[in-house]
Amino acid sequence: MAPCGDVAGAVASMLCALGFAGVFCAPPSAGFCAEPIVVTQGPFAREARLADGSERGRVDVDVLTCREEAGAAEAVCLDAERALRGAAWPIDVDGVRIASADSGGAGPRGRDGSGRWLWGFTLICTVVRHVG
């Protein structure tokens, strides 16, 4: 499996803890896992420097479900979005705190090169990281 960024790794771990299987940080080959959930993160966007020297900002984490059936891709995606929105935030991992998370809404993302259906959403994470 490809290494996860700190925030994407925490979200992937949270999905596993919530009972989701086949969670990866990069798309696996269809022979290894035909119906994965793929979690990737965007860059940290600093919003404020805090008095203790840490930084608060936003990291967008994309969650993509891949299934053979369109209805299954939608159902798993909606379940994952609902589970993450209701998860126990904040969490701390490797010097990064995910203070809160919200989502931008789930929707279809077309099909992959193998013809499997894709559904996804963006988890908008408020993150505090320690620098220095």
Image: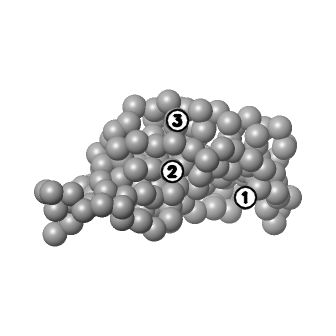
The three-letter code of the residue at mark 1 reads: Ala
Q: Is residue 61 above or below residue 100?
A: below
Residue 112: image x %, image y %? 79, 61
Which part of the image, by quadrant, shows the C terminus?
Answer: bottom left
- In the picture provided, is 31 more to the left or to the right than 115? left
Q: Of the numbered discs in the image, which one, if any, rests on residue 124?
A: 2
Q: Where is mark 3, residue-wise?
A: 85
The three-letter code of the residue at mark 3 reads: Arg
Q: Report if the CB atoms under discs 2 and 3 are less than 8 Å apart.
A: no
Q: CA distance from mark 1 to mark 2?
A: 28 Å
Q: Earlier in the sequence, mark 2 or mark 3?
A: 3
Q: Where is mark 1, residue-wise?
A: 30
| Foreground of the two, 17 or 81 | 81
The image quarter containing residue 56 is bottom left
Q: Nearer the viewer, mark 3 or mark 1?
A: 3
Q: Earlier in the sequence, mark 3 or mark 1?
A: 1
